[in-house]
Image (cartoon, coloured by chain):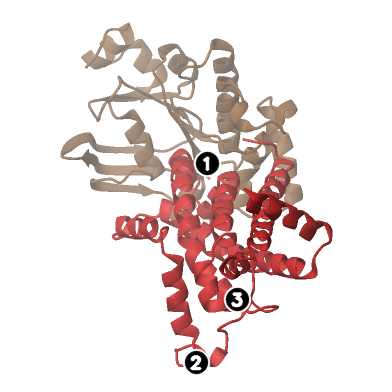
Amino acid sequence: MSMAVSLHDVAVRRRGKSILGPITTDMAGTGFTIILGPNGSGKTTFLKVLHGVERISDGALEWSIPETEARQAQAYVFQSPIMLRRSVAANLAYPLQLEKLGKPAIAKRVSEWAQRIGLSDALDRPATRLSGGEKQKLAIGRALIRQPKVLFLDEPCANLDGRATREIEALLLDANQRGTRIIMSTHNLGQAKRLATDVLFLLNGRIHERGDADVFFAKPSGEESAAFLKGDIVE
Amino acid sequence: MNDIWSGIEAAFWLVITLDADLVDITLRSLQVSLTALIIASAIALPFGTWLAIRRFRFRRAVIATLNALMGLPPVVVGLIVYLLLSRSGPFGVLGLLFTPTAMIIAQVIIITPLIASITHQAMRELWAEYHDLLISLNTSKSQRIATLIWDGRRTLLTAALAGFGRAIGEVGAIMIVGGNIDNATRVLTTAIALETGKGDFALALGLGFVLIALALLVNFAIHALSRTEREGRW
């Protein structure tokens, strides 16, 4: 079963400054949503609000399933991956240990996922010594190992080279096909076109435009989104 | 200069002949300080970590107090523990005064704030690094504390060693609550104080060298142990 979320007039303000909203929208289905928008448009805040780790100042956010269950069924990958000061294997095992899974089950899932993210040979290496691309792949593997229903990613490929980006995109598409709904922000238009099934364009903390990827990229309805797609600087 | 040489000589012979009194005193020193260290660590490591991750109203005041308590004068701690444990005190019935247990209690009070404060400093940095991930993974409070303690165990070792150093070299409090009774509560530091008072500088110095060697030995041993851990260094 997939889970849906509905936002009603959600707003985030910090020190009297409006950062996000008001936003009213629904997100359902099992698609691959790409969040586009210039720096400071509220992409990260929006993702964190959905994930439930950012306090909202106004409005309401509701998942279609009870909140604790919803939190348990989500995972989040940060722009700069956070590595536990442990081995690669221990990093992968950590979310499963939190769920008190048995040791044999953990070992099996860890080796399976290590293979999927291409780090089978590095299981005993300290995670903090991996390269940038390897770290991000490990972070994605660690996020997916609990088989979340929803995965949030905040510009996971910023600062990564082409090869690492390609590997990560393959991982994400694979996860999406296995039924994980993905909501991801990116700066990279090419990446957005490669991955998105639908697009959400944020500007100044509000949803400026939203629609299917084909339609959005072919015929954006807003002036700003058209300018953004053309590569102009939008503020 | 003569005194120092004869001190070294005395120390040498004390160690070589495994002087019965020396062994007894040394073992008691170790027993008291290591027990105090274990108890204090069991309190201070989780507490310091908890302080690092928990936001509450009087947090700053608690941390400031903790830092101030690092400099707690041992003699005053000794005096207060003495009053609490003496026959007329609230815990007099337990009959703990002038026993190694009383000395352990005093040392726990002295080193717990020190270990907790260093722990808090170290854990605050690690928490800043881990914060987003652990929140995102929906960890419980105890899981967060356990994760931080495990991943920060090497810095915590430093905190524990600082506590041990303070405990093993401490004399004021254990002199008061232990009473420096031969074969019962005499430890290296109180013995040194006694021998110095009696004018037996050679023996006092000998004991002093043994004390320093002991502190070094424990530090080396713990470092060697932690370095050979399977998961490598960070």
Q: Which residue is mark 1?
A: A149
Q: Which residue is mark 2?
A: B87
Do callouts 3 and 2 mark residues in contact (Cβ within 8 Å)? no
Image-quadrant location for residue B76 = bottom left
* Chain A representation colour: brown
Left or right: A118 with respect to A149? Answer: right
Find residue A223 and report its horizontal and vertical position in percent. Answer: 22, 13
CA gap, disc 1 and disc 2: 66 Å
Q: Residue at x 47, y 57 (%)?
A: B114
Local SS, label 3:
loop
Vertically, is B223 above or below A228?
below
Decide: few, some or many residues near mark 3? Use Cα within 10 Å; few <14, some 14-19, many ≥20. Answer: many
Q: Residue at x 50, y 71 (%)?
A: B173
Find residue A228 and report its horizontal and vertical position in percent. Answer: 29, 12
Find residue B188 and report its horizontal and vertical position in percent. Answer: 64, 65
Q: How many marks?
A: 3
Can you name the residue that lies furthest to the front here? Answer: B2
Q: Which mark is residue B180?
A: 3
- Under mark 3, the amino acid is Asn
CA gap, disc 3 and disc 1: 67 Å
Q: Quadrant of the C terminus of chain A?
A: top left
Q: Nearer the viewer, residue A109 or B142?
A: B142
- Under mark 1, the amino acid is Lys
Vertically, is A134 above or below B130?
above
Local SS, label 2:
loop
Do callouts 1 and 2 point to residues on the same chain? Answer: no
Q: In the rendered image, what is the letter of the chain coloured red?
A: B
Can you name the residue that lies furthest to the right here? Answer: B17
Find residue B141 and report its horizontal and vertical position in percent. Answer: 48, 57
- Under mark 2, the amino acid is Arg
